[in-house]
Amino acid sequence: MKIFQDKEETSLYGRRTRKDSVRIGVIGTLDELNSFVGLAVSGFDGGEIRQILKEVQRDLFVAGADVATPLDIAEKRQRIIHDDVKRLEDYISRLESELEPLNRFILPGGSREAAVLHICRTICRRAERSIVALKAHEELNNYVFVYINRLSDLFFVLARAANKRKGVEDEKWL
């Protein structure tokens, strides 16, 4: 199969799908998010944040494949599962315990690393909205939705942790 085509359709498990379908939109947004996570990874030479982000990149490939694979496909494929969600929740809890509690909104930014993580957070929220739109019309593994929801929270906490580790204070709004 040639990689280059000029048709308005693509193939998902032998089925032709329009490129403007909600499912393809979700897959594309997850791919975009994964690319920005790669940019975020490049800002860390090592350490816990880099390791977490590398795990997230692998999970996002699984999430994309999960969305691409209709639930009625009998083949065994990797899927996002409860343990993936729990892992994110554990990271969030641990990282939050190291940060000052917030009583006001903060502006996205601070260090370059935190700014990129905030971009990841907003792309993740867009992916979440797209998943909700897809779920309104088609069956989908609900753990994908829950995972993406928690992931946006993780990006927020990671951005704050990145600022703290860089010695940059989160800028409060108002």
Image: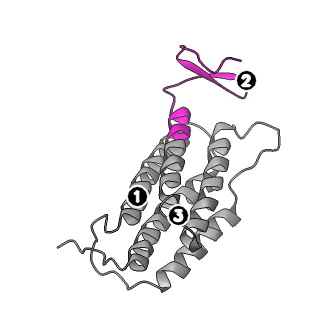
Q: Earlier in the sequence, mark 3 or mark 1?
A: 1
The quarter of the picture where the N terminus appears is top right
* Res 98 label: none
User: What SS does tag 1 mark?
Assistant: helix
- Residue position marked by numbered label 3 in the rendering: 150
Amino acid type, label 3: Arg
Indicate the position of residue 45 as horizontal and vertical percent values.
Answer: 54, 67
**Regarding mark 3 in the picture, which secondary structure is present there?**
helix
In magenta stretch: residue 85: no
Q: Which residues are magenta?
A: 1-28
Residue type indicated by callout 1: Val
Q: Amino acid at mark 2?
A: Gly
Circles 3, 1 touching at the beta carbon (< 8 Å): no
- Counting residues from the N terminus, which is met first, the one under dot 1 or under dot 2? 2
Residue 121 image point, x, y percent = 43, 58
Residue 15 picture quarter = top right
The residue lying furthest to the right in this view is 75
Badge 2 is on which residue? 14
Foreground pick, 170 / 72: 170
- Label 3, label 1: how far apart the Cα atoms are: 18 Å
The image quarter in which residue 161 lies: bottom left
